[in-house]
């Protein structure tokens, strides 16, 4: 799978930290919504990137490890709830058999895989503390049962710290877990305890404080407004269909084919859809007729509902790549299915086995025979620029960071906005240092296949204004050499 400029952000941050001794990422402009600092960069990516000399394969491998760890932690939660290893194994099997086309949304950089790991740890601690509180009853001399009101402070502190670090790193933890936890605890849990009251209250307060602080008070983090205005007609005509299509993509290949206009719908897709639908309906019946695990089920169901609402009113709904915001929603559905199956339930076992077998066949048929050459086009362009001594230049965001990272900074391309008379730095996963002390020789890189007539007019006016040399051509790219140009000061505008 090829990487893009978004996906190599943590690789460039690792370079800044180690190669340029910028240990605290001073002057680095990160998106406030998902910095990934404490959920991915520091615990998973930084050291492997340094040890492998910033190898893109290591970047992808570590994200896969995050995916595996996340699935493992969630499987352990299923075991905590059911007490059965078979249920945990069932969830693991369902989780690793996601549709092949959806794999990139679960286990590539920007897939929020590290957030799933931290979410799983937090949820496991919450379930453990809640169970311990339920067991803290003792008989008095008169035989009356009373609850021990002592507070489990070590667990409270651990939960608060983990919550703060996760919210700093990724805002999506709020609709995925924090808001569902508050809702489920208030509406579902009947016998509340002092410890859980304090945990839920502090997690809510800390989440709100950290979110406000990171969004509005860290100057070098680019503000992203999660909630945006959406017209009613747009919700029904565009966003709702996109939600169901994206969620189906993460759950089942047959279901996705249906929501994709029955594209590629064949025998395997039909069998897969039938098995998944039967298992989901059967599991829903079990949940409705089983009064156990109300807190656990309440959190997961609330997470599904809240994420649905957030998708409708937030900037999470962009295109099919928005499926990456629904990965935990898919996991929540699979956890509910896995936890609802009893050990001796032959019907559930048969349905699950059928689904897994069909998914395995479908997965093999989808990936067998494919030859992967990730980022071949970018590597070819890098070689061409090296041969022509083009080592520093400017381009749009989607060509800047990826070329800089894949070349190990042998070719340095900085993200800019193009205007008719000048260029301005693009404040997105960028460092102020990158636009200071620029060399006299540089270039403008343009993907000629991706710009329209207006874009060509802008580039023509800009290259004329800057006295660019005659363009060089490599495949779909135009490269305009510059002499003596230095980009203006790095500025960020905050509302």
Image (cartoon, grey):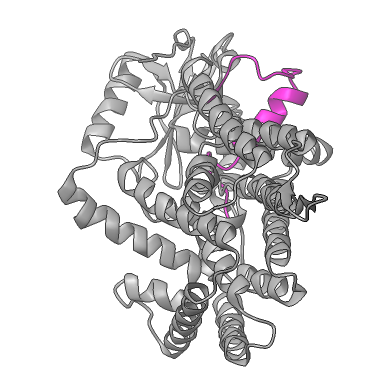
The reply to whether the magenta stretch includes residue 2 is yes
Q: Position of residue 196 (x, y in %)?
A: 64, 41
> Which residue is the extreme one toward the front?
142
The vertical placement of 372 against 361, above or below, is above
**Left or right, residue 261 beside residue 417:** left
Q: Position of residue 222 (x, y in %)?
A: 47, 23
**Left or right, residue 79 beside residue 263:** right
The vertical placement of 122 against 15, above or below, is below
Q: Quadrant of residue 38?
A: top right
Q: Quadrant of residue 493?
A: top left
> Quick one: quadrant of the N terminus?
bottom right
**Left or right, residue 395 beside residue 125:** left
Q: Quadrant of residue 439?
A: top right
Q: Which residues are magenta?
A: 1-30
Residue for point 57% across, 57% down = 295
> Quick one: quadrant of the C terminus?
top left
């Amino acid at each position: 799978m090829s990487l893009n400029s978004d996906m190599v952000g943590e690789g460039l941050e690792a370079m800044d930290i180690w190669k340029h001794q910028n240990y605290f990422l001073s002057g680095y402009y990160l998106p406030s919504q998902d910095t990934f600092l404490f959920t991915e960069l520091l615990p998973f990516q930084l050291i492997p990137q340094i040890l492998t000399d910033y190898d893109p394969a290591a970047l992808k491998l570590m994200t896969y490890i995050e995916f595996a760890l996340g699935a493992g932690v969630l499987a352990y939660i299923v075991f905590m709830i059911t007490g059965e290893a078979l249920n945990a194994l069932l969830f693991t099997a369902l989780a690793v058999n996601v549709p092949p086309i959806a794999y990139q949304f679960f286990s590539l950089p920007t897939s929020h895989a590290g957030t799933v790991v931290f979410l799983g740890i937090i949820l496991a601690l919450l379930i453990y503390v809640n169970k311990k509180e339920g067991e803290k009853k003792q008989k008095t001399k008169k035989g009356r049962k009373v609850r021990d009101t002592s507070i489990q402070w070590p667990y409270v502190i651990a939960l608060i710290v983990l919550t703060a670090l996760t919210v700093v790193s990724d805002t999506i933890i709020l609709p995925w877990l924090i808001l569902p936890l508050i809702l489920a605890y208030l509406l579902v849990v009947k016998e509340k305890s002092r410890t859980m009251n304090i945990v839920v209250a502090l997690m809510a307060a800390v989440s709100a404080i950290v979110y406000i602080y990171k969004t509005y008070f860290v100057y070098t983090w680019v503000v992203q407004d999660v909630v945006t205005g959406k017209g009613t007609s747009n919700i029904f005509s565009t966003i709702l269909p996109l939600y169901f299509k994206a969620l189906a993509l993460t759950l089942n290949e047959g279901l996705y084919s249906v929501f994709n206009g029955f594209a590629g719908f064949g025998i395997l897709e039909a069998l897969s859809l039938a098995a998944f639908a039967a298992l989901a309906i059967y599991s829903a019946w079990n949940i409705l007729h089983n009064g156990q695990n109300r807190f656990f089920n309440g959190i997961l169901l609330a997470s599904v509902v809240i994420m649905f609402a957030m998708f409708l009113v937030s900037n999470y709904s962009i295109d099919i790549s928005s499926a990456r915001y629904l990965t935990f929603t898919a996991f929540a559905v699979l956890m509910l299915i896995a936890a609802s199956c009893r050990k001796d339930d032959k019907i559930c076992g048969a349905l699950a086995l059928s689904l897994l077998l069909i998914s395995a066949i479908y997965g093999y048929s989808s990936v067998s025979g494919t030859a992967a050459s990730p980022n071949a086009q970018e590597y070819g362009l890098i070689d061409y620029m090296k041969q022509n001594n083009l080592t520093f230049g400017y381009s749009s965001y989607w060509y800047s960071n990826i070329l800089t990272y894949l070349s190990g900074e042998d070719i340095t391309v900085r993200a800019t906005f193009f205007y008719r008379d000048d260029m301005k730095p693009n404040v997105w996963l960028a460092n102020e240092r990158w636009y200071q002390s620029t060399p006299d020789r540089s270039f403008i890189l343009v993907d000629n296949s991706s710009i329209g007539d207006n874009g060509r007019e802008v580039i023509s006016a800009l290259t004329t204004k800057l006295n660019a040399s005659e363009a060089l051509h490599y495949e779909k790219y135009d490269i305009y050499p510059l002499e003596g140009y230095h980009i203006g000061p790095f500025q960020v505008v905050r509302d």
